[in-house]
């Protein structure tokens, strides 16, 4: 009869837990265990989800900033742990980007206290306890293989989630870029355009279009003299028929001159009632020759 040696006993413990049910998007669950860590989780039944960002604020309606972008937004069961919250009274919401650029902000929520308790049953040392017996006939190599199979499987560390930036022009969201493409985007704006970019928070970029400064160049036909009066200079008169229409700065009609009979005519600035910009339309033989403006100075 072969002698048997008992090398290893494996004891099992029973974990009795109660847990919360994950809400289905756009609803989600926010709980805390009272250890300054907040757990945000949800169930995803959307057919297409391009991006999910978790946002946090001390106010329920404003001041939200994104704290994390989910690595795989399509996962049916998902969630994150916020261990950097200032306190457990913060508000959370989700920013969900769906197909064709459609996006939605969920309602904001505060964490609720999770009262889950874990009860560990002590192992019972009796003859019915599960055990592993390795016979003396097993080779050392086979014994090592058995031990390797019984060893716990190492848990792989989840990859760091990708960070995304929202690009806005005024109040419109025009693009979403990840952090690895941020430098390429910035260089493209700086080198290929005259636009400027500015950060408006940790994850929001404002794109400010370049607006060239208007340089005023007076007309050679109707312009302001040094004394503030208006000069009409049409060398072709009276051989050609010239007429003028005058408007205020809001393009409201003021008066007209149906026939300019002299090459140079001076209009007293009192005809324009107050200082400011005025517009005119000059016609030559019934056809528009120029549309421009001039400035009437104060006395």
Image: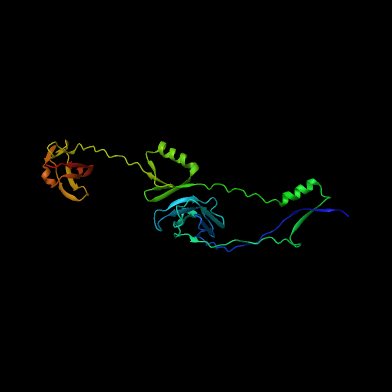
Q: Residue furthest front?
A: 125
Specify whether residue 262 is in view: no
What percent of the width, then of the height, locates residue 71?
Answer: 54, 50
For residue 192, above or below residue 127: above
Residue at 75 percent of width and 57 percent of height: 131
So how many labels did they put on this image? 0
For residue 125, above or below residue 165: below
Residue at 72 percent of width and 51 percent of height: 149
What percent of the width, then of the height, locates residue 250?
Answer: 22, 49
Q: Is the C terminus in the top left, top right, bottom left or bottom right quadrant?
A: top left
For residue 111, above or below residue 210: below
Specify whether residue 165 is in view: yes
- What colouring method underlies this structural image? rainbow
Q: Is the N terminus in the top left, top right, bottom left or bottom right quadrant?
A: bottom right
What percent of the width, then of the height, locates residue 280?
Answer: 20, 44
Answer left or right for 11 relative to 216.
right
Answer left or right for 223 relative to 134.
left
Answer left or right for 96 relative to 159.
left
For residue 107, above or below residue 277: below
Q: In terms of depth relative to the viewer, which is nearer, 131 or 44?
A: 131
What percent of the width, then of the height, locates residue 103?
Answer: 46, 55
Q: In terms of depth relative to the viewer, which is nearer, 179 or 266?
A: 179
Residue at 76 percent of width and 47 percent of height: 144
Q: Residue furthest right?
A: 1
Q: In terms of depth relative to the viewer, which is nearer, 73 or 175?
A: 73
């Amino acid at each position: 009869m072969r002698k048997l040696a008992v090398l290893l006993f494996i004891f099992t413990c029973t974990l009795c837990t109660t847990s919360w049910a994950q809400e289905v998007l756009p609803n989600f669950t926010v709980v805390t265990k009272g250890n300054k860590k907040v757990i945000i989780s949800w169930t995803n039944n959307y057919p297409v989800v391009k991006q999910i960002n978790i946002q946090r604020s001390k106010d329920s309606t404003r001041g939200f900033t994104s704290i994390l972008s989910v690595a795989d937004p399509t996962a049916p069961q998902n969630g994150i742990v916020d261990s950097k919250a200032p306190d457990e009274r913060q508000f959370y919401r989700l920013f969900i980007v769906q197909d064709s650029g459609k996006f939605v902000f969920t309602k904001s929520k505060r964490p609720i206290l999770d009262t889950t308790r874990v009860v560990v049953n002590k192992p019972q040392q009796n003859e019915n306890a599960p055990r592993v017996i390795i016979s003396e006939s097993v080779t050392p190599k086979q014994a090592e293989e058995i031990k390797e199979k019984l060893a716990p499987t190492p848990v792989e560390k989840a990859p760091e989630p990708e960070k995304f930036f929202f690009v806005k022009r005024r109040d419109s969201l025009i693009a979403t870029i990840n952090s690895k493409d941020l430098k390429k985007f910035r260089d493209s704006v700086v080198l290929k355009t005259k636009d400027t970019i500015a950060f408006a928070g940790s994850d929001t970029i404002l794109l400010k279009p370049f607006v060239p400064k208007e340089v005023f160049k007076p007309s050679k036909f109707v312009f302001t003299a040094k004394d503030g009066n208006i000069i009409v200079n049409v060398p072709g008169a009276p051989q050609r028929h010239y007429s003028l229409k005058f408007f205020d700065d809001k393009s409201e009609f003021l008066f007209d001159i149906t026939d300019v009979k002299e090459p140079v005519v001076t209009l007293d600035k009192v005809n324009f009632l107050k200082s400011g910009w005025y517009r005119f339309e000059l016609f030559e033989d019934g056809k528009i020759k120029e549309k421009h403006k001039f400035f009437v100075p104060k006395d």
